[in-house]
Image: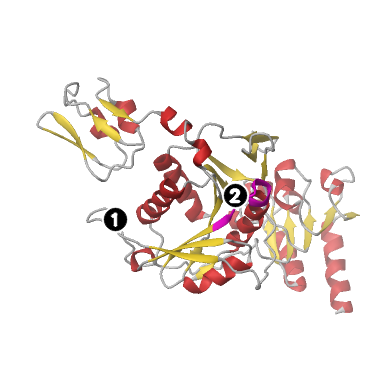
Amino acid sequence: MSVRVIKDKCVGCGACEAGCPVGAIDVSSGVAVISDACISCGSCINACPCEAIEGDTVEKKEASIADYHGVWVFAEQRDGVLMGTAAELLGEGRKLADKLGTELTAVLLGYDVSGLTDDLGAYGADCVLLAESDKLKDYNTEAYTKIIADLVCERKPEILLIGATSIGRDLGPRLSARLYTGLTADCTSLDIDPETRGLLQTRPAFGGNVMATIITPNHRPQMSTVRPGVMKKAEFAPEHKAKVERISVEFADGEIRTRVIETVRSLQQTVNLIDAEIIVAGGRGVGSAEGFKLIEQLAETLGGVVGASRAAVEAGYISAEHQVGQTGKTVRPKIYIACGISGAIQHLAGMQNSRCIIAVNKNSDAPIFGVADYGICGDLFKVIPMMIEEYKARK
């Protein structure tokens, strides 16, 4: 959407200048002037009391929906390493593309990352759009948004999928505003309506108590962010090759207003729940931070990592980086051991796709037993030491 000032109506009140989120408007000589920094978000249109700012109408985009074809996946990489979310999105994108009878395209931005194109092809991409520049070495909201938005406007994909990582949560909304289309965040399921060819975007709502399916009937592309760990990774098939197309990268002076000067990595040990094969999680039933030492001991014995329910985190037993569930991480390990976790629907949403679930709870009516492959009804402070002892003996 392009935004224009109707000079005859403008009174120079400055309301649009104050309402612009990117500082792209300057009121000089009594008339608002919009600079090239404008992201076409439309905030100034709503802020103007005199209706002196206008933009392209929605109907103009509605009439061209039939021109949009293809499924695109933003292939996130960091420091030249492809993120696991890329393989997950390509796996899901492949299913959508096959149902639509169209191509699956991976969009890869970075610096000296051409070596990743073979992996993207092996994960199922038919085509890779590769944009390389030293200005793309570190993630930059303005740079990434401009390149992807320009590509979308030029090539018109009907679906664009982005991982709901820290980068994806920043990039998705900016692209949505720039492209004047909707964005469904934190999707847990995606499908195609066979009648309309529309994307069915399902995500939890009202605290996880309702699963809402959202559609985007009047705008393109249909955009979704997908939580890491929710979708199954695509099978790696080295024989599948993708067509690689290099995209030229050019930025006008002043177009990129921020740059990364230094990256300081946290010295704190991070918890990799997403890729863990064994997770031992504790809930409110653990009773205290001291009680979590037993959970940690079992996890260490099994070579796994420690998870937690929201109740345990909110009680201060353990930090939020360990949280599994609707408001935490979504995981699918080989073994998930739930200790003192009742099994609220919000927690189940984050771990129910684990290959094997073992529940330890002294309440025989706990909902967790409804999804568990193996259930132990007993006091976790008696059961867990027995599990540790038995494992060590067999090892």
The x and y percentages for residue 338 are 78, 55
Q: Residue at x 37, y 51 (%)?
A: 146
Let me know if residue 257 is in the magenta part: no
Q: Residues within 10 Å of mark 2 (few under 14, many from 20)?
A: many
Query: Looking at this rendering, what residue extends furthest in the left direction?
Result: 29
Q: Which quadrant would residue 261 be assigned to in this image?
A: bottom left
The x and y percentages for residue 18 are 26, 33
Q: Residues within 10 Å of mark 1 (few under 14, many from 20)?
A: some
Instruction: Quickly name the residue at label 1.
Output: 256
Q: Amino acid at mark 1?
A: Ile
Instruction: Quickly name the residue at label 2.
Output: 226
Q: Residue at x 77, y 57 (%)?
A: 354
Q: CA distance from mark 2 to mark 1?
A: 27 Å
Q: Residue at x 79, y 46 (%)?
A: 342
Identify the image quadrant of the C terminus.
bottom right
The magenta stretch spans which residues?
97-105
Query: Which residue is more in the foreground, 160 or 309?
Result: 160
- Asked if 50 appears above or below 336 in the picture, the reply is above
- Asked if 14 appears above or below 279 in the picture, the reply is above
